[in-house]
């Protein structure tokens, strides 16, 4: 079952259960999926693209939570946190620092990088091999440590 179908099924379940916060989050996810499909005139969305959209939505929620926390808007923080929790249910788990470090060392070895000037080449190789399961900020930090 594709992620789009799974989200649609979860929406129906949330409607029946009258779980309004979950339903709101699922509708937002589905709207983002439909927008991406309409942009290209497609009837389906590959899971890889759906995961990329989910990551963008999650990143947006994290940024909103930070902004609302700084502004003292705890009511809005709770709403964003609830949506983030639902979004994260559908995302594959990201690699931890130890795994990222191993992948980064492998990418450095494959590219032959020896200085920070070649960080882009290493990031390209790393993201090409592990994009769906890699936290980009953590990868940058690890590569800086290894090359720096």
Image: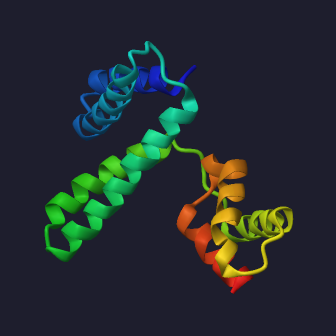
Q: From this viewpoint, is residue 34 visible?
A: yes
Q: From this viewpoint, is residue 85 visible?
A: no
- Say which residue appears at 65% left-offset and 77% top-offset: 117
- Examine the image and state in which quarter residue 100 appears: bottom right
- Examine the image and state in which quarter residue 148 appears: bottom right
Give 41 or 72, whichever is nearer the viewer.
41
The outermost residue toward the top is: 43
- Say which residue appears at 35% left-offset and 24% top-offset: 39
Q: Residue 122 appears at what percent x and percent y?
A: 71, 65
Q: Residue 74 appears at what percent x and percent y?
A: 17, 66
Q: Is residue 71 above or below residue 43?
A: below
Q: Residue 108 appears at what percent x and percent y?
A: 79, 69
Answer with left or right where residue 103 lies relative to residue 50: right
Instruction: Locate the N terminus and report the quarter of the image it occupies.
Output: top right
Answer with left or right where residue 103 lies relative to residue 69: right
Q: Residue 101 appears at what percent x and percent y?
A: 74, 71
- Say which residue appears at 49% left-offset and 23% top-offset: 45
- Say which residue appears at 39% left-offset and 44% top-offset: 86
Give 148 or 100, whichever is nearer the viewer.
148
């Amino acid at each position: 079952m594709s992620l789009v179908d799974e989200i649609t099924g979860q929406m129906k379940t949330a409607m029946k259960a009258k779980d309004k916060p979950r339903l709101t989050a699922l509708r937002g996810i589905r709207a983002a999926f439909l927008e991406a499909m309409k942009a290209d005139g497609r009837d389906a969305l590959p899971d890889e693209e759906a995961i990329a959209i989910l990551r963008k939505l999650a990143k947006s929620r994290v940024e909103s939570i930070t902004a609302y926390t700084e502004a003292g808007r705890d009511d809005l923080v709770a709403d964003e946190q609830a949506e983030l929790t639902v979004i994260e249910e559908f995302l594959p788990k990201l690699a931890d620092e130890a795994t990222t470090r191993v992948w980064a060392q492998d990418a450095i070895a494959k590219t032959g990088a020896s200085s920070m000037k070649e960080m882009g080449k290493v990031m390209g190789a790393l993201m090409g091999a592990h994009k769906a399961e890699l936290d980009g900020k953590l990868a940058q930090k690890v590569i800086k440590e290894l090359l720096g």
